[in-house]
Each structure stands twice: as structure tokens, then as C-alpha cells.
Amino acid sequence: MSQETLKNQKLTVIVDSLGAELQSIKTADGTEYLWQGDKEFWSRRAPILFPIVGKLKNGSYIYNDQKYNMSGHGFARDNEFEVKQGLLSELKHELEYELRENEGTLNTYPFKFSLKVQYKLNDSAIEVKYIVKNLDEKVMFFGIGAHPAFNAPIKKGNFEDYKISILPDKERKTIPLNTAEGTLFLDQSVVKGESEFPLTRELFSGDALVFETPEKTDVIISNTIDDRNVKISYENMPFLGIWSPYPAEAPFVCVEPWCGIADDDQTDGNIATKFGINELLPDEKFECEYIIEIN
């Protein structure tokens, strides 16, 4: 494991090679915005979800009539990435990491691939890009997503002083979770008009809030104490999860843009027909990006 630091006049960002995972986002005054992984609540900080997002029904999937086991959110978060480049001026502003298939991944995911993760500092924002390439000779199926956790409170106040706003303010489809299995009740999806969610513990009593977000989306974490906020912006990531552990009184909330999603409760397990799955032909690339803006 190794850590790299990106820095400009407004932000200092630390990334770990294990999972290519964000470790810290600090402003010039030393305020930490990223959750610091207290094991009492949740030991991770901003894991990358690949090659699945969420949980598989019964912890497995079927490909070419063969069963493969895989834990929730996939294996990328627990694999060592290679640091590919750092663009150095007086300070480092960009990083690129890469993960390729290995003996361990092939046991649970029979595809050759490249997953590149790029981090770029741009004023008070961190741009995060995922690039997936199919290095195999067959069609590749995958999901990918982000899972960054942000302090709530950031500096002052309590968890309940914060709220989540999803923009544009419009009706969007929400998908309930089977909390016992971690799968989705797709047939119980409903369209709701709520776009603003004051943070309470009970908000997450049914696990994560899951939304379909087919358009450009901004998610803002703000509070009633001061002007500090975090904005997560993305497009071409069709699902969104909002999560904080329940009933633990954890001082953080996760904002998770996804290109992929947990299994439907009624799935037959075939990865090729999995709801929300992405596919790539040999040598094809897939890209998606989200931006964390610190205010």
C-alpha cells in the first residue's frame, strides 16, 4: 500500500493505492470533509464498487451456466491498484490508478479487464473518472459505482442539523430494498416527488435510499449551522444511493452515484440479464465521472 497527495491552494486530497480509495479531503483551514473510517461505525471511507454494485441474490451469479460467488460491491476495493502517473508541476494535481485481472479476480469474475481511476483537482473540486476496458475476447458484464462517505457534522452541529438535496427538484423513481437480503424489490418501485431529505436516523431504517437518476444530477449535503456544504455532481450514472448505518449513530452520510445496482429479488441470477448491468464488447471502453465540490 502507498498513499499519494494531491494539493492546490484550496484542497489537500489523499488517495491510497489499496482500492484506489480516497482517504482525506481537507480544506486550507484544515477541516476534514471525508469520513475517516472509524471501525466502530464503518471502517471504509470511499470504496470503489466493481465489478458489481450492491449485493447479489444468494451471494452469487451465473455466467455460461457456471456459478460464481462474489461478496457485495465486488473486489476492487480490496485489491492493490498500480499508480500509473502523476502530473507534477510545483504541486501534484492529477493521479491515475489501474487494476487488471489477476488470479484472485478470475476465480470470481472470469473476465480480463482494465479498470482505471483518475483523480483531478480543479479549484475546490475533485473530479473522479472511471474507465473500464474489456481486454477479453468475449462480451464482458459489469457494474461500477462510488461510495464516498462525508462527515455530518462537517465541523459544527449534529447529524440532524444536516440535509440532503437532490437536484433537479423533480419526481423520481425510488426502489425499496429487501433489508434481510440486500436485494431490490423492483416490483415495488414508486415515483415520489421528494427532493429534500433532512437527516435523521430513522431515514435509514430501511437501509439505503435508492433512486433512479437518468439525468444530470446534483446532490448537496448542507446544514443549518454554517455555509459549509458538499456537492456531488454527475451524469450518465443512472442510480443513486444515500446511506448511513442504522441504528448506529454514525456521524457521516454516503452519497453514491452508481452505474449498476443490487440484484432484483426476483432475479434468476444470470449476470447477462441482471437489472442495470453494463456490457462491453472486446476492446470497448466505458467511462463515467462524478465531481465532489467542497464549499
Image (spheres, rainbow, N blue to C red):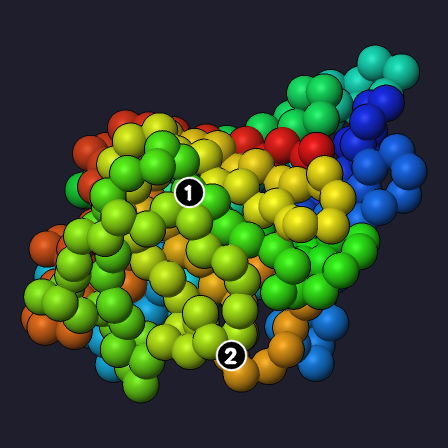
Tag 2: amino acid: Tyr
Q: How many marks?
A: 2
Q: What residue appears at the point 88 percent right and 33 percent down from the top-left corner?
A: 28
Q: Position of residue 242 (x, y in %)?
A: 45, 57
Q: Nearer the viewer, residue 20 or 120?
A: 120
Element at badge 2? loop
Q: Would you call the spot at circle 1 few (<14 residues within 10 Å), some (14-19), or many (20 or more)?
A: many
In this rendering, the answer to whether 47 lies above or below 218 is below
* Horizontal relation, residue 231 to residue 18: left or right: left
Tag 1: amino acid: Ile
Q: Position of residue 201 (x, y in %)?
A: 53, 74
Please give the residue where the numbered disc 1 appears in the rendered image.
166
Please give the residue where the numbered disc 2 appears in the rendered image.
246
Quadrant in the picture for the C terminus: top right
Q: Position of residue 149 (x, y in %)?
A: 60, 56
Note whether residue 295 is visible: yes
Q: Nearer the viewer, residue 84 or 226?
A: 226
Residue 31 is tagged as: none
The nearer-to-camera label among 1 and 2 is 1
Instruction: Please report whichever mark, 1 or 2, sits nearer to the chain's N-terminal start.
Output: 1
Q: What residue appears at the point 23 percent right and 53 percent down from the top-left corner?
A: 192
Q: Would you call the spot at circle 2 few (<14 residues within 10 Å), some (14-19), or many (20 or more)?
A: some
Note whether residue 5 is visible: no
Q: What residue appears at the point 32 percent right and 80 percent down from the top-left corner?
A: 179
In this rendering, the answer to whether 45 lies above or below 184 is above
* Horizontal relation, residue 52 to residue 196: left or right: left
Q: Nearer the viewer, residue 194 or 63?
A: 194
Dot 1 and dot 2 residues touching (CB under 8 Å): no
* Horizontal relation, residue 79 to residue 271: left or right: right
